[in-house]
Image: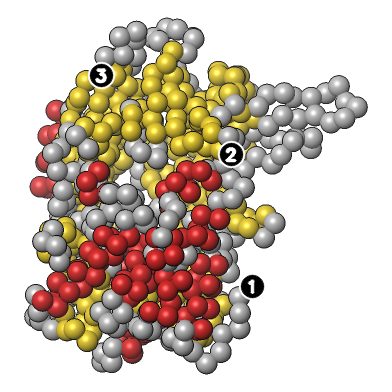
Amino acid sequence: MLKQLILFTAIFMSTVAVAQDKAAVDFGAREGVLDVSLSPDGTKIAYIIPDKGQGSRLYTVDIASGGKSVPALSASGDPERLSYCEWVSNARLICLISMVLREAGEPVSVSRLVAVNADGTELKLVSNRQGYNAERFSYFGGSLIDLLPGDDGAVLLGREYVPEGRTGSLISKSDEGFGVDRVDTKTLATKSVIRPTRLATEYISDGSGTVRIMGVMKTDAGYDSGVRRYVYRPAGGTGWQPLGEYDNTTDSGFNPYAVDPTDNAVYGFEKFEGRFALYKVKLDDSLTKTLIFNRPDVDVDNLITLGRKKRVIGVSFATEKRQAVYFDPTFKKLGSSLSKALPDAALIHFGGMSADEQKLIVWAGSDTNPGQYYYFDKATNNVSPLFATRPELEGYKLAPVKAVSIKAADGTLIPGYLTLPVGVEAKGLPAIVMPHGGPSSRDEWGFDWLAQYFVNQGFAVLQPNYRGSAGYGDGWYQENGFQSWKAAISDVNDSGRWLVSEGIAAPDKLAIVGWSYGGYAALQSAVLDPQLFKAIVAVAPVTDLGRLKEEYRGYMNLRVARDFIGSGPHITEGSPARNADKIKAPVLLFHGALDRNVGVYQSQFMADQLRDAGNIAELVLYKNLDHYLDDSAVRAELLQKSSTFLKGKMQIK
């Protein structure tokens, strides 16, 4: 139970008053377009925009006739949210609805799939309906496996089956597990394609209606072992053959992603000399494996697929900037041309595509361009602007992001990104070190709403990819940012010292801000060096590694989580809440009460421990929000409170 905090700690259960700071409102606004999809004939667009709170609305528009946008579906955000919508025909869409609910006091994720006409009529649930006699409640609403090009309105869905039956009744259903059904989204007529399989977790089709690969969880004493056993179906066959195994805990083995039916092979990722590389494996008795693309410096981590058949056209990786390598010469040329032709378009992503591959949705952006969607017609070579990703920021002068190398105390060069206020000399500035979340993640070059807001407020922002970050191979990742916390946090702190040594930051105006693992790093940095940072902002932080392990008790992935977090002295030494007496800087905490990634008690416990140690701390709780605080008013408040807090504690005017 949260203790009443007196004297040193203020607790807020925020109802969110609209922030008065216009910049906080504008930078904190959710993206103006959350999802875009193109119809098979390329004449219609479906797009999702944010609504009040966590709400969202789906619109469709016939761009061929220049028609007006038509409302098709809405979600209040309390609790249902629209995650994505995809055209299943030229007149109908399938949409994923997600929500976070409370069960026995704990937040749980629930999803459902629905289908709706472009004009909002004939809304139908396409997820499995459960009977009253189901043995348990199904939280998972299914997944879209194949759009069945040419089969108007029908799709292949991955669906969860739960046994049904009751004592004294002859009527029962024994199907159990995850299977694949062909579902007509108009009539709901259903045909089983692959019978439900216990512990099945994944299916991959060839994009033309044939499921070729199945992934099955391997268990250990009833818990998820982290290993997936993959099997495949030969071309034209029905029986399953062994493909291989992938271990999520060690990132070892081949992890399949997409089937190429023309070559009868599957693309996927596997380690090569300690870094992820792209491979192709033949789906026949030979299982011939071919290295397609690798880098000696970073992981190759993203397969580029396009169209309703998810055709593989390339791969991407991030060095100082994300780069794409296209196998398809048409898109290689197109990507290069669009990057040059469109304004401020260093980054290009291809989105939806018509069935004939003549019309596309293209997203373009950069560090100073939050992003713009375009409609491209290959036949006419015409590019038309559709939506700005963040229209509220159109009047702002956004700051360029520079890749830098930060020299750590042991001489290691830490890659990172430095963003400086526009038009101000980079000397003696108030500055923020902003470690990324994860920890199995990394920062990349591009627009970052959080960093850009603080730069707008006059801060220099440094985002280090500390040791423990993903993307640079096994040697850099080490044992992950929890078990190798000393290396990770040392790099974070050395990043702050680098800002001072370079003359960029004033030593008495150096702060740290982080979200999730970044919040953990922000707090733990002050345990390792209490004098370095003068103020700390931590959003949804991990604060106690022992309690984090216990959070997974009762879940299938308990063993995986415990192995990831580990055991030993680092559980105590690496937990900021257990070392709160060492933290001297004032702390501001934010957390959503429905957070499933990091339990809200982590911030509550941290606030208690800081209070007991006599430190200054504020905790802001949001009752109906999860880990991402995906609410424009909330994010505006978070930004304004954080800026006011940092400036006040460091006496910045």
Is 344 above or below relative to 198?
Answer: below
**Residue occupying image coordinates x 67% and y 54%:** 103
Earlier in the chain: of badge 3 and badge 2, it is 2
**Residue occupying image coordinates x 26% and y 14%:** 288
Crowding at label 2, few (<14), some or many (≥20) Cα neighbours within 10 Å? many
Q: What is the C-alpha distance between the residues marked 2 and 1?
A: 33 Å
Q: Residue furthest front?
A: 569
Left or right of residue 30, residue 507 in this image: left
Left or right of residue 500, residue 95 in this image: right
Tell whether label 3 touches label 1 (CB within 8 Å). Answer: no
Percent x, y of residue 433: 25, 71
Residue 613: give its label. none
Q: What is the C-alpha distance between the residues marked 3 and 2?
A: 35 Å
Badge nearest the viewer, 1 or 3: 1
| Three-letter amino acid code at the position of disc 1 | Met
Residue 1: give its label. 1
Earlier in the chain: of badge 2 and badge 1, it is 1
Secondary element under disc 1, as helix, strand or loop, is loop
**Residue occupying image coordinates x 39% and y 64%:** 574
Tell whether label 2 touches label 3 (CB within 8 Å). Answer: no
Crowding at label 1, few (<14), some or many (≥20) Cα neighbours within 10 Å? few
Residue 141: give its label. 2
